[in-house]
Amino acid sequence: MQLSDFDIIVASEQHISYAEQIVEEMAESAKARGTGIARRSPDYVANKMQEGKAVIALHKDGTWAGFCYIETWSHGKFVANSGLIVNPEFRKVGLAKAIKYKIFELSRQQYPDSKIFGLTTGLAVMKINSELGYEPVTYSELTTDEEFWKGCQSCVNHDILMSKGRKNCLCTAMLYDPAEKEPPKEEEEVKKEEHLEKVTHKSKLFERIERKLGSFKLFNAFFLNKY
């Protein structure tokens, strides 16, 4: 089995039938890890599919293989790629990484100016996040939206989070800030102009060289014919 055996696509209304299976596997996976995630209902996941704010992986035979969805907080200033899950039947193929890359791309398309963040205890997820440009940050740099933090109430480590005044917990906070990754548009324009000037200069230089070579060839031809 290899990655090419799967289709990793933006989920839509036609994938709603998978919602209940996905939610059940999310809950089982959280139990197995001994950590928690915000519990979501099949209706919640189905709604994300309808909104085009989720990515689903399907095996060629139609079996669901993986899933992840987008959540927004603080009026769209922050985005989280949540609920990453891979069907146990299809693990060790590279699906988690492929889904993360796809949902990250979708997030950047839909929310180009938003900060993308995540809380995780998984080393594999941390590694993928680092590859995408996330950096470890303190909890104070994340959203202050109370609705987001309410989602932590279903985690087995919630008491630890609250005992530390929500300043840290067992999860590592990671953040992708587009403002730090991309130069300002004005700076981009300046770079484009500088690049164009260099290209134009080289083009004119080649033209001068060609003219000189042409003149040299004419001189040689004249000289040989004369003598």
Image (cartoon, rainbow, N blue to C red):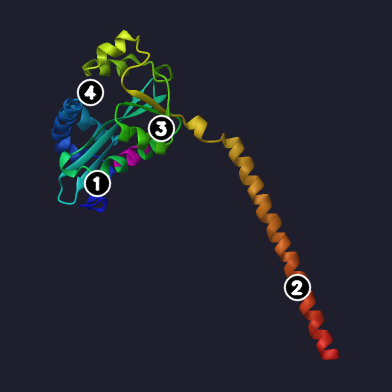
Residue ID at (66%, 46%): 194
Where does the image place residue 157, in percent across and percent down from the top left? 25, 16
Q: Are marks 3 and 1 in contact (CB under 8 Å)?
A: no
* Left-right relation of 167 to 201: left
Which-is-in-front pick, marks 1 and 2? 1
User: Which of marks 2 and 1 precedes in the sequence?
Assistant: 1
Where does the image place residue 77, in percent across and percent down from the top left? 42, 24
Which-is-in-front pick, marks 2 and 4? 4
Q: Which mark is residue 111?
A: 3
Rounded to the nearest angstrom, the CA distance separating label 2 from label 3 is: 54 Å
In the image, the segment drawn in magenta is 99-104
Q: Amino acid at mark 1?
A: Val
Which-is-in-front pick, marks 2 and 3? 2
Element assignment for label 1:
loop
- Mark 4 — residue? 35
Rounded to the nearest angstrom, the CA distance separating label 1 from label 4 is: 23 Å
72 and 4: which is toward the camera = 4
Q: Which mark is residue 93?
A: 1
- Mark 2 — residue? 213
Binning the other alpha carbons within 10 Å of mark 3 as few (below 14), some (14 to 19) or many (20 upward) gives: some
Q: Amino acid at mark 4?
A: Thr
Q: Amino acid at mark 2?
A: Leu
Residue ID at (68%, 60%): 203
